[in-house]
Amino acid sequence: MTSFFELLKTRRSIRKYLPKAVEQEKIVQITNAALMSPASKRSNPWEFIVIQDKETLVKLSESRPHGSQFLADSPLGIVVTADTTKSDVWMEDASIASIIMQLEAQDLGLGSCWVQVYGRQKDENMTTESYIRKSLNIPENYSVLSIISIGYPDEQRKAYEENKLPTHKIHFDKF
């Protein structure tokens, strides 16, 4: 069994995937992990849209001029949304759920990559969020934070080396 620390060391952003579908039981495990994510006052403002349809993944890959194109070749994307009327810290709650999904995917032998949606532009006339909201019929009271791309890795990334961590960023008692 892999330790949590080892999981953190080896989880890296993967943007190239084998042309192999993610099994339904793994998708259920990843989404169940997200549903167990901590949320402020258990408001659970997050909701997730599981995308396996190739056409939809291609459409999502066009949501930004840079940083989303690899979704076209991803076997799975999970759009992370949150009902902004349920919590004033929906962004933090949705962020926690996003990383929980990535860690669960890593634990299952899958790769993943976070695609930032919130605060990004599709082009000069439309935000990435508006494009995705329109494409997936997401209600107006929901914001879209991210898309988590998931699949079997078709690239290798080196694990973090502990001796190269920026430990100067750790402060004790005072900054």
Image (spheres, helix red, strand yellow):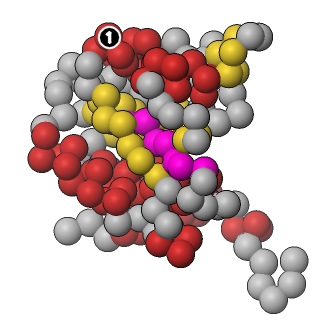
Tell me which corner region of the image, top left, top right, bottom left or bottom right, holds residue 23: top left
Single out the residue that lies furthest toward the bottom. 173
Q: Position of residue 135 (x, y in %)?
A: 46, 18
What's the magenta bit mostly, secondary-structure-wise? strand
Q: Amino acid at mark 1?
A: Glu
Q: Position of residue 81 (x, y in %)?
A: 49, 42
Q: Is residue 80 magenta?
A: yes
Q: Position of residue 56 (x, y in %)?
A: 35, 16
Q: Position of residue 62 (x, y in %)?
A: 52, 12
Query: Left or right of 171: which side holds 133?
Result: left
Residue shown at the point (42%, 24%) measured from the top left: 136
> Between 117 and 161, which is closer to the camera in this rendering?
117
Residue shown at the point (17%, 27%) measured from the top left: 21
Residue ID for mark 1: 55
Single out the residue that lies furthest toward the right. 175
> Between 161 and 169, which is closer to the camera in this rendering?
169
Tell me which corner region of the image, top left, top right, bottom left or bottom right, holds residue 71: top left
Q: Which residues are magenta?
A: 78-84
Residue 116 visible in the snapshot: no
Query: Left or right of 145: which side holds 109?
Result: left
Q: Number of numbered discs present? A: 1
> Between 151 and 31, which is closer to the camera in this rendering?
31
Q: Which quarter of the rendering shows the C terminus?
A: bottom right
Q: Is residue 161 magenta?
A: no
Residue shown at the point (46%, 62%) measured from the top left: 44
Query: Left or right of 32: which side holds 99?
Result: right
> Between 142 and 104, which is closer to the camera in this rendering?
142
